[in-house]
Every structure is written in C-alpha cells, then in structure tokens.
Image (spheres, rainbow, N blue to C red):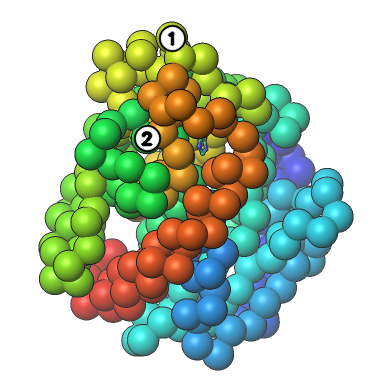
C-alpha cells in the first residue's frame, strides 16, 4: 500500500527541490525504459539530479544503475527524463513510482510519456519494432491503488493512453517514415519470462506485446491526473514464438541495436509536443 503519511512530507520536499533547481515544471515527463537511455543525448542544456536528492522518488538498491532525473529541452519543448523506475518484480510492491509521479503532477507536469522494452506477440512487429501503446491488460490484476480512499480511487481506465496524443504520434511517425505499430501491452509480473502457454493466452486475449513494467505507472498517473502515452520497443519475440532462448542479455543486445532509432523518434515526438495543448 502507498504510505501516504510519508508521501505527505516527501512530495512537497521533492517539489521544492525540483522547483528551486529547475524553476517551473516542464509539461512533459518521460520515463526511460531499457533500450531508451540514448534519448538523454538529445536533451539540450541538460541538468541532472540523482533520485537520492528527491525523497519521494524510488531509492536505488543496486549500485551502478543510473537513477536520476535529467531536465532540459528538445527543440522548443522543455522535458524531464526519469532514468530508472521501480519494477514490481524487485520487491513485490507495485506502488514504487507513486511518490515520483505525484511529485511530477504537483510540480506542474501534464503528460507522462512512458517507454519500455517488450516481447512481441505479433509477426508484423519483429524485434526492433516500435509499438505505440493503445491500451493495456493488467494480467497480474495488481493495483497500486489498493488501500487508497475516496471515490477518486475508482479511476476510469478507458482511453488511459490519450487518444488524441496517439493520433498525433502516429501522424508524426508517418511524416518521419517510421514504422510505428499500435497495439495492446500486457503486463506480466516477472522477473521470470513467460511460458509459451501464457503467451498463447495473452495473444488470445488481444495482447500484442508483453513486458514487466508500465501498467502500475499508468494507473498511478491517471489517478494523479496526468495524461499518459506509451511506446514499447520490441526486443524479442515472446516466449515460444521464436527458436531463440529468452535471456536478459538478448533483450539488452536487441535494445542496444535499435535503441538509437527509438531514441531519435522519442526526441522528435517530445519536440513535436510544443505545438500540442496538453
Ligand atoms: N517478456 C517480458 N518482458 C520483456 C520481454 C518479454 O518477452 N522482453 C523484454 N521485456
């Protein structure tokens, strides 16, 4: 459950820190998933701050992982990048990003743009493809909002991934001659990869991609009143759909191979948002 007593102190402290270092909030926040780190190189006049300075943010448990925010602009659009997210498979807790997302909302951010690495369930989206997330399936049926109070907790999840912004992203991809699929992302708890039978079930349910993140954050962000967009980078065919054994190394390798194109599109998308009312 979310520790709201703790966050009542940690969120204002985190907002004060962001405001004093970076001034008013950018309208756009981006969560960088595996394979998307290269996007940071597109940020102009970047300034960074480690999560350890932001008490509402997830505190890194593993040394060596980058856990920081980077604030700057891409073209005319100011942006804050979140490098590092809390995954449910690390602790069993799916509320790990609550403080960070509520801090962003309180500071004045309007849109949460999420990125991740996923397994593909569809032959027309081979490894290296990008998929705009149109909708999600919460397969573990876990919610970060368990224990929250008030009617506000009954969040409408229809069009959780903003329909107008999806149209905008698809039009941009077309102009840039980039293949951008659109589909349904299925959350699997992990950290083990799925069985082939689970993947057949997810496909029958209508899932197009599978991964171990994003869904708790989307629920938290919609509850906080942020708009949400999501883009998944396919790093592998999902379990049972290719002869290749699934390993973390394989997904990282593929993420590295396609990361530059993904980061380029992400940068173009962020820049294009300066003309969009959020
Ligand atoms: N399954 C779950 N998560 C993933 C996968 C996958 O196949 N690839 C990258 N993240």
Residue nearest the observer in this picture, 113 or 121: 121
Q: On screen, 136 above or below 85?
A: above
Residue topped by disc 2: 120
Q: Position of residue 25 (x, y in %)?
A: 50, 74
Image quarter hosting the C terminus: bottom left
Rendering coords of residue 227 (x, y %): 34, 52
Side of 59 where 215 appears, left or right: left
Residue that appears at 83% across and 46% down? 61
Image coordinates for residue 111, horizontal then vertical, percent: 38, 59
Mark 2 and mark 1 in contact? Answer it, CB < 8 Å: no
Residue 165 vs residue 224, the one in the foreground = 165
Secondary structure of the residue carrying numbered label 2 = strand
Which residue extends farthest bottom? 45
Q: Secondary structure at mark 1?
A: helix
In the image, is 236 to the left or to the right of 18?
left
Please tell me which residue is depicted at 86% across the width and 55% down the height of the picture: 63
From the Cβ of disc 2, is ligand 1 less than 8 Å away? Answer: yes
Mark 1 surroundings: few (<14), some (14-19) or many (≥20) residues within 10 A = few
Task: Please give left or right for residue 233 compared with residue 97 in the image.
Answer: left
Q: Ligand 1: does it lie within 8 Å of the C-beta at label 1?
A: no
Relative to 80, is 190 on the left or the right?
right
The dot on residue 173 is none
Q: Which residue does the image show at 53% across and 38% down from the upper left?
A: 213
State how far apart marks 2 and 1 are (Cα): 15 Å
Query: Where's residue 20, x and y in %?
Result: 67, 81
Q: State the image quarter where residue 274 is shown.
A: bottom left
Residue 3 seen anywhere in this rendered image of the structure: yes
Above or below for 227 versus 110: above
Question: Where does the N terminus fall, quadrant-wise?
Answer: top right
Considering only vertical position in the picture, is 129 above or below 258? above
Nearer the observer, 99 or 264: 264
* Residue that carries the numbered disc 1 in the rendered image: 197
């Amino acid at each position: 459950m979310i520790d709201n007593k703790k966050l009542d102190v940690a969120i204002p402290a985190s907002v004060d820190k962001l405001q004093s270092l970076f001034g008013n909030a950018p309208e756009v926040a981006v969560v960088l998933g595996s394979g998307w780190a290269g996007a940071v190189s597109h940020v102009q006049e970047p300034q960074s701050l480690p999560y350890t300075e932001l008490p509402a943010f997830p505190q890194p448990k593993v040394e060596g992982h980058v856990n920081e925010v980077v604030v700057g602009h891409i073209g005319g659009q100011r942006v804050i990048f979140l490098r590092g997210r809390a995954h449910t498979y690390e602790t069993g807790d799916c509320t790990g990003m609550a403080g960070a997302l509520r801090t962003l909302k309180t500071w004045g951010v309007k849109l949460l743009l999420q990125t991740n690495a996923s397994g593909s369930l569809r032959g027309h989206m081979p490894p290296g493809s990008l998929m705009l997330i149109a909708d999600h399936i919460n397969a573990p049926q876990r919610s970060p909002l368990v224990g929250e109070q008030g009617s506000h907790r009954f969040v409408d999840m229809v069009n959780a991934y903003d329909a107008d912004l999806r149209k905008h992203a698809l039009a941009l991809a077309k102009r840039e001659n980039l293949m951008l699929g659109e589909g349904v992302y299925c959350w699997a708890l992990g950290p083990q990869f799925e069985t082939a039978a689970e993947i057949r079930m997810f496909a029958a349910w209508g899932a197009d991609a599978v991964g171990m993140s994003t869904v708790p954050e989307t629920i938290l962000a919609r509850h906080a009143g942020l708009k949400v967009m999501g883009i998944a980078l396919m790093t592998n065919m999902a379990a049972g759909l290719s002869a290749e054994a699934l390993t973390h190394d394989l997904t990282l390798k593929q993420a590295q191979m396609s990361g530059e194109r993904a980061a380029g599109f992400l940068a173009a998308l962020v820049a294009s948002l300066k003309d969009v009312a959020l």
